Image (cartoon, rainbow, N blue to C red):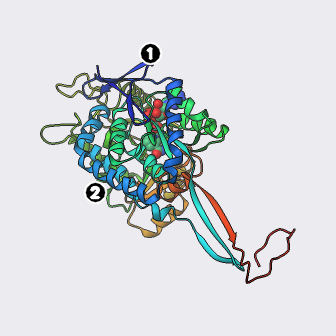
Amino acid sequence: MEQVKNFIGGQLTDSQSSRISSIFNPATGQVVRQVALSTTHETQHAIESAHLAFTEWSKTSPLKRARIMFKFKSLLEENCDRLARLISEEHGKIYSDAVGELTRGLEVVEFACGIPHLQKGEHSANVGTGVDSHSLMQPLGVCAGITPFNFPAMVPMWMFPVALATGNTFVLKPSEKDPSLSIELAKLLQQAGVPDGVFNVIQGDKEAVDVLLTDPRIQAVSFVGSTPIAEYVYTTASAHGKRCQALGGAKNHSVLMPDADIDMAANAIMGAAFGAAGERCMALSVVLAVGDEIADKLVEKLRHQIGHMSVGTGITEGKENDMGPVITEQHKAKICDYIRSGVEQGAKLLVDGRGYQVAGYENGYFVGPTLFDYVTPDMKIYKEEIFGPVLAIVRVPDYDTALNLVNYHEYGNGAAIFTRDGETARQFSEDVQAGMVGVNIPIPVPMAFHSFGGWKRSIFGPLNVHGNDGVRFYTRMKTVTSRWPASVRLEHHDSSFVMPTME
Ligand code: NAD
């Protein structure tokens, strides 16, 4: 059986670990590859290789680093079809959604192509007589990225293009559930001209992660995954003196106002709730319908549309499915447990996705689209992240109740409002406690030149990923203040013993 390798110092290497994890095709339930969970020693080896490569890479001109990013971008485009198929095989998402995730990752590469401009710092002439100041945005050293299963291409590309372009070296620890993409990205980076050791991949689990969080050669850690692990990563990395950004889970709410364009809203809600089988951190899992009238209209439209959805394999010969399977058998069981608890706690189950069968793929991890009405805030299906194709409708009497619910929820990744009223939308954008807000847009994922990140327990650390925050995260500022002696023209000044102020 093929085993996914590590990529250390420019070489594909086999792990010697005896701990092996299986990689499944979620549509068939069959093992397609295996991956060894790397040892502490192997992880240290990857860090050492990045450490050794740092000095030369950090001194390479930003212009040259940008040219490598341009080349990497073209290689990603040339290989898009092959990569999308691989994502779909190990993750289960439909082909065009895999292309979409590659595109969003590619946009961060495009952003990183502009690094000579982004990293050029600031300059002030004559801050004092004959004194100039300029700032340098210098790379940190070895940076680590630890990534989740749900975006095996995009989430690593939220991190390493900016980290590498700013002059850092990198060790990526991808999810052990769909790790093959990481190696394909490493090979393309090498082909684009990234020197050996600058980008490394270590396959593994907690053992590898713990080395990355504690090794003194690692300067910064970027993490994306579930909230309990994000919190652990943030506290451990910070306790070891590292810069850390750790993005966690979500429960994204959408407020449906009585004046909303109901057709537009229903279409948007369908895609946002059930796209990628709900396995997106920006998936929409709660609709707060303001008033029974709009709630009834929404329910009618969603039931109709759900009835026409096709659930099946991510890759098809003919017409594409709308939704694929979820990632593992265990995750499928967890989602079904949530559905059971919703019923037990009194929510009204309008569409039940349990027991969904796809002909010819009886062992696949399929859960059909599931719709609950009359969900209340005390229920488990309201409070917790399900990360599956389950949508909860909560009926609320007015806008203020809706806003308070969004704001009291422990997560604050994304939030959206559907309305025709500009003033309500403006007020919502101002008052809502979430990092990314959509107005008649259900999944408000910022473009690469803005930054991505939530609020509350959806993120730990002050800086978001990509955009200007990404550049700030992967660089540290040094400010140089200089005066040049004008030996022949001016007399020398005497020493000064007071706090320097610019005269
Ligand atoms: P996860 O937290 O289980 O795993 C994420 C990474 O952490 C993986 O690389 C995994 O190997 C590692 N890991 C797992 N357990 C660990 C432990 N005990 N100690 C150290 N490392 C550990 O997350 P997942 O199931 O792969 O991904 C789904 C989660 O990611 C969801 O909660 C989703 O909301 C979140 N997510 C968030 C964002 C965001 O931008 N906020 C984006 C994508 C996914």
Q: Amino acid at mark 2?
A: Asp
Q: Residue furthest front?
A: 488
- Give the residue at mark 1: 18
Res. 417 visible in picture: no
Which image quadrant is residue 347 in? top left
Rendered image: mark on residue 263: 2
Badge 1 crowding class, 10 Å Cα cut-off, few under 14, some 14 to 19, many 20 or more, is few
In the rendered view of the protein, which quadrant contains the C terminus?
Answer: bottom right
**Residue 145 vertical position relative to residue 293 in the rendered view, above or below:** above
Residue 160 is left or right of residue 98, and the answer is: right
Residue at x-position 31% and y-position 25%: 24
At which x and y percent is residue 476?
A: 60, 55
- Secondary-structure class at tag 1: loop
Q: Nearer the viewer, residue 49 or 104?
A: 49
Residue 121: image tag: none
Q: From this view, report whether residue 367 is shown above or below residue 72.
A: above
